[in-house]
Amino acid sequence: MEASKEYGRMRFLRIAFGSMNSVLPPTGTEQLLRLLSPFVPDQYLQDHWPQATTGGRRHAFSAAQLWRVHLLALLTPVHSLNLLVRLLSEQRAWRQFAHLPHRHRLPGVRMLHEFRERVGVSGARQINELLLDSLLESVDPVAPAVGLIDATDLKAACCGSKKKHRRVFGSSRSQGNTQLQDWTEHVVYRLQKT
């Protein structure tokens, strides 16, 4: 029963997506970043959040550069800012999109966090509305479009470490041993034995 459901879903998706010709390149590609780069309101960002001084030798980045780095977290397969900052030096197309000319002068995670604090929620909404307005101006309102919402039920990952070592550590409901030192010696002995 489950296999036939899955087959039906895959057949539907193949038909739906097979007939759809996307005008956008795949996520994370250099072509997509080049296509979307002109829509980022750099001047608006620099006017509303001017470049802050660091007070030290660190290179200060403009608001437009920092916002573009944040957009990379959405436009690339990397969805963690920590990982994005680590990979930024290796990805030339990402640095070009973010207007970061030097391979080794890159914003850190702390800088991105401070920028988000400085912009705030209302500032992020203003920027997103400006982005959306400029993107919607370029869309043909008469062109047919298809939107699919994926509401796939996923099985929970229940094979964590909670019950994995029950034989070694004993039941979580057992009445505790009051001599903790003796208990740990027994556990170490059982671990060495296995």
Image: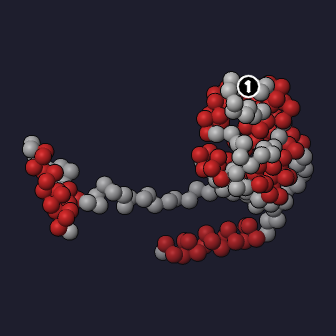
Can I make out residue 164 in this image?
A: yes
Q: Image height check: is 85 above or below 124?
A: below
Residue 122 position (above or below residue 165): above
Residue 189 in picture, x, y percent from top left: 15, 61
Is disc 1 surrounded by few (<14), some (14 to 19) or many (20+) residues within 10 Å?
Answer: few
The colour scheme applied to this rendered structure is secondary structure
Q: Is residue 100 left or right of residue 140?
A: left
Secondary element under disc 1, as helix, strand or loop, is loop
Residue 74 visible in this rendered orientation of the protein: no
Q: How many tags in the picture? A: 1
Vertical comparison of 151 with 14: above or below: above
Question: Residue 106 occupies which quadrant of the picture?
Answer: top right
Q: Residue at x 65, y 53 (%)?
A: 87
Image quarter in which the C terminus is found: bottom left
**In front here: 60 or 44?**
60
Q: Nearer the viewer, residue 46 or 139?
A: 46
The residue depicted at 86 percent of the width and 40 percent of the height is: 134
Which residue is the extreme one toward the front? 57
Q: Residue at x 83, y 25 (%)?
A: 47
Is 116 on the left or on the right of 169, as rendered? right
Which residue in the protein does label 1 denote?
52
Q: Nearer the viewer, residue 68 or 153?
A: 68
Q: Residue at x 85, y 43 (%)?
A: 39
**What amino acid is at disc 1?**
Ala
Residue 36 in picture, x, y percent from top left: 83, 49
Could you tell me residue 107's position as x and y percent?
68, 39
Q: Position of residue 34 (x, y in %)?
A: 85, 52
